[in-house]
Image: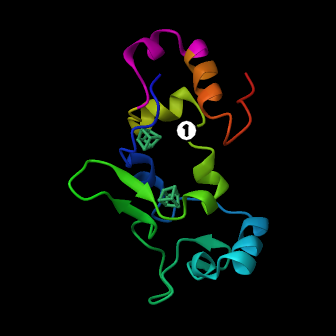
Amino acid sequence: MKECNQCGKCCTNYGGGNLSVTAREIDWWETHSPEIASYVSNGRIWVSPVTGKTMDRCPWLRKLPGQKKYICRIYYNRPDDCRHYPVDIEQMVKDDCEMLEVHDLRVPGKAQKTLDRLMSDSRPPVKP
Ligand code: SF4
Ligand code: SF4
């Protein structure tokens, strides 16, 4: 298991209307980050404040110039759904997450423990 290389696949896969958000997160953005809150509508993210339509791509995702790397412009205030990704090995395989290495597929239980350790700043470990 490698560290995240910021390939951006997860944000591209899920950032276009496939993220969930809680009322608590929305309340926090409304108070502390109205710019983020402006992309919320009827409890859904991300919705364009201009068109009122769900966006095809996350508005906070930026490609670094001249690199195959992406950054999140709201990294420290991003939704918990983003914060918790990747959750498990199955999801990583499905999404072709680049943290995975071949040997992780041979011993997925051990790989999950390594993933949980790498993610310990962002989410609790996944229950077996
Ligand atoms: S909010 Fe940030 S982490 Fe979440 S999908 Fe957008 S760019 Fe990715
Ligand atoms: S798909 Fe995996 S390696 Fe790529 S940015 Fe997301 S977590 Fe990182």
Task: Determine the residue positioned at 61% across, 58% down.
Answer: 76
Residue under label 1, please give it. Answer: 86
Residue at the location (52% across, 29% down)? 90
SS at badge 1: loop
x, y percentage for residue 71?
Answer: 42, 55
x 25%, y 59%: residue: 65
For the point 47% across and 31% down, which residue is it?
3
The residue lying furthest to the bottom in this view is 50
User: Where residue 128 sits in the image (x, y, percent)?
Assistant: 73, 21
* Farthest left residue in view: 66
- Residue 100 on the magenta segment: yes
104 within the magenta span: yes
In this rendering, position of residue 66 left or right of residue 7 = left
* The magenta segment: 99-110
The response on whether ligand 2 sits within 8 Å of label 1 is: yes
Residue type at mark 1: give it.
Answer: Pro
> Picture quarter containing residue 86?
top right
